Image: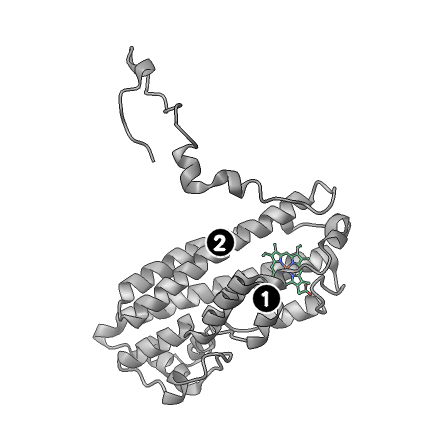
Amino acid sequence: MSHHHDAPDAQHGNEPENPFLDFQGTTPYEDYVQADVLTHLQHPLSDDPGEMAFLVTTQVMELWFTVIVHEWQTAAQALRGDDLPTALAALKRSTYEMESLNASWKPLAHLTPGQFNAYRSALGEGSGFQSAMYRRLEFLLGEKSASMLVPHRGAPRVHAELEKALTEPSLYDEVLAYLARRGCDIPAAVLDRDLTRRYEPDPAVERAWQRIYSEAKADESDLIRLGEALTEVAELVWRWRNDHLAATRRAMGAKPGTGGSAGVAWLEKRAAKNVFPELWTARSHV
Ligand code: HEM
């Protein structure tokens, strides 16, 4: 965003050039970043000074979800075109982004129930459970569910995006189709599965990963790299879920959630799910 022309007040001596100050309209920074929009989207619902951190942390996480969805879609599309290097680069970027996403739990990780209560009732029935971008992230992992579209019936664009994500192959579906094209033994029932349903682990897929990890042929070392990139993604998703669980436990104990679930007990069940399940179970047989 910086370009050079002669700045009149930087001509004398060894003064370093000063930045440009004169712009016709809004600054090029603003035109690119839309910081004025972004920093005026914070509308707390209570008078509690602690609510701002809760709201902004949630918004920051929504932005990271958006980038990560973009990376995984890039990876899925690259795999569809048999372009593994592009897919690996996108997965690698996504793991750095997930580290930042997970680090953003910090401001919410030590809330006392009293501090959380100061704005909790103002949230009404609002809950992260209703995050459409998080749902797209789960769909890309293979955690599909048509009923997760129901909360978004009133928002046509969001609903259409989610419906598309529900019917498209997940990142893992594209991985398995790619493995099949690379000569791995992936059953037709897996390759032709109903894409709108949750991915269920398959013993033949576990055997495929086991074979890759224990007896990869000379030209298959890149498949181990793919397996490891996906394992890293899976572990970081698991960490996000568990950090969320720990923050929730500290902030509200066993009370029901604002979204209507049993709260911690419901989140525990969600956190226990294995992402890319066969990549974990195959390890017992290598
Ligand atoms: C201390 C703060 C938080 C508490 C106490 C909390 C609590 C909960 C609870 C109890 C649920 C279960 C659904 C319900 O009944 O509401 C839930 C779900 C969820 N929350 Fe939070 N949450 C917190 C912060 C956040 C933040 C900052 C985000 C970021 C977007 C977030 C995203 C989510 C998501 C995506 C779900 C759905 C998870 C799934 O579908 O498996 N939460 N949360």
* 2 and 1 marks in contact (CB < 8 Å): no
What colour scheme does the image use? one colour
Residue picked out by circle 1: 152
Horizontal side of residue 1 vs 140, given as left or right: left
**Residue at (55%, 63%) from the top-left corner?**
132
Identify the secondary structure beneath mark 2.
Answer: helix
Q: Is residue 34 visible?
A: yes
Q: Is residue 239 visible?
A: no
**Secondary structure of residue under mark 1:** helix
Q: Residue 205, position in %: x, y?
A: 39, 82
Percent across and percent down for residue 188 are 36, 88
Please, is residue 146 above or below residue 161 in the view? below
Q: Is residue 8 left or right of residue 98?
A: left
| Quarter of the N terminus within the rendering | top left
Hey, what amino acid is under mark 2? Trp
| Residue 141, position as x, y percentages in the image | 47, 70
Viewer-side residue, 253 vs 217: 253
* Residue farthest along the left direction in this orientation: 218
**Disc number at residue 64?**
2
Mark 1: which amino acid? His
Report the front residue among 33 and 265: 33
Above/below status of 233 relative to 169: above
Mark 2 and mark 1: Cα distance apart in space: 21 Å
Residue at x 47% of width, y 41% of height:
34
